[in-house]
Image (cartoon, rainbow, N blue to C red):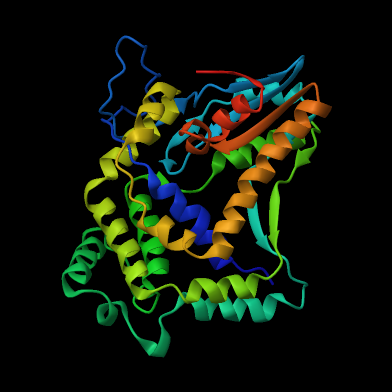
Amino acid sequence: MRARWLTGLLLFALAQYAYCASGNDVADNAAPPSADNQVMDEVVITGEWPGPQLWKISKGDHVVWILGTLTPLPRKMIWKYADVDKIIAASQEVIGKTNVRPKVSIFGWVPLYFQIRKAAKLPDKQTLKEVLPADLYQRYAVLVHQYRLDDGDFERLRPIVAAMRLYQAVIEANDLTGKNDVHETVLKLAEEHDVPLKDVTIKVGEPREVLKDVSQLPRSAEIACFTDVVAGLETDLPLLKKRAAAWARGDVETLRKLVTAKERSACRDALFSVQSVKAVSDEAKSTWLNAITYSLDHNQSALALSPVYDLISQGGGLDQLRKAGYQVEGP
């Protein structure tokens, strides 16, 4: 039995909500605009687009190319991956995105599954209407009505889980998607070229204890998270679309500027207040960096994936690689 692990879902999905961006409509199947006439108020991207340029990390004549990924992206965008395809064909390794999974036996999945279901729900058959402040619940109800969502499943979820479900539903209703098709395409290309995939997976040895820790988050922290998500969905959707459009165009400069955009961090702060969750996040970052440095020691060429804001933010992956003495080139 496979189950979506609550902690991993919240940690990596809600963390993606930290940065915001904005944009204007682009006609269906339009060719990418030139640098002279690109507009910065696009909100819809359809047709074929190049995606971001790659960063080149070098150690002597050994190279790792890094593709910065992003969620959400435009649902109808088609990624033109010809350049990435050539790099993969000439590589000895592809380093995939970091995954977090519970370390359990096949027999451990059943009790973990039921613990996940229990941890996701409010205790004592409470509902969101009972635990959220009345004004916040009303704002949430407006979003549900506006996007014609079926909120039957939301009502009994804990605020931090309901926030994630609400966020995913609303971005889908706005022609954005959190599905990582870029990652899946890269894996497919690696398989086609028979290039080994390095699976960067963090296995958590005591997943039930981590779930227990998350379940003990203060209600106030969960409500703060829910408030942040509702506020973002009320005002920041144009910004999310702009960020998605910048990724599709390969406009890394705009993405870089948006690192300093207003950050809604209540969800991440809540999760990182749980020491076991923070430890998982720290391990994920260090494991990815170790995979890059190992590849630079052992492979002539490799391609790696990383969330773009983990790369370009201050103190992010690129800064850490520069600090370690590697040559970093890119947009």
Residue 247 image position (x, y, % from top left): 44, 30
- Look at the picture and state if 174 lies above or below 304: below
Residue 47 image position (x, y, % from top left): 43, 29
Along the viewing direction, whichever of 29 and 187 lies nearer the viewer: 187
Query: Which residue: 45% across, 48% down?
Result: 16
Along the viewing direction, whichever of 141 and 97 lies nearer the viewer: 97
The answer to whether any part of residue 47 appears in the image is: no
The answer to whether any part of residue 19 appears in the image is: yes
Query: Which residue: 32% across, 33% down?
Result: 242
- Look at the picture and state if 67 lies above or below 9: above
Figure quadrant of residue 58? top right
Residue 170 image position (x, y, % from top left): 33, 55
Q: Is residue 293 left or right of residue 75?
A: right
Residue 233 image position (x, y, % from top left): 27, 53
Query: Which residue: 31% across, 17% down?
Result: 38
Q: Is residue 155 left or right of residue 204?
A: left
Along the viewing direction, whichever of 260 and 227 lies nearer the viewer: 260
Figure quadrant of residue 268? bottom left
The single residue placed furthest to the bottom in the displayed view is 124
- Look at the picture and state if 310 lies above or below 331: below
Query: Which residue: 31% across, 57% down?
Result: 229
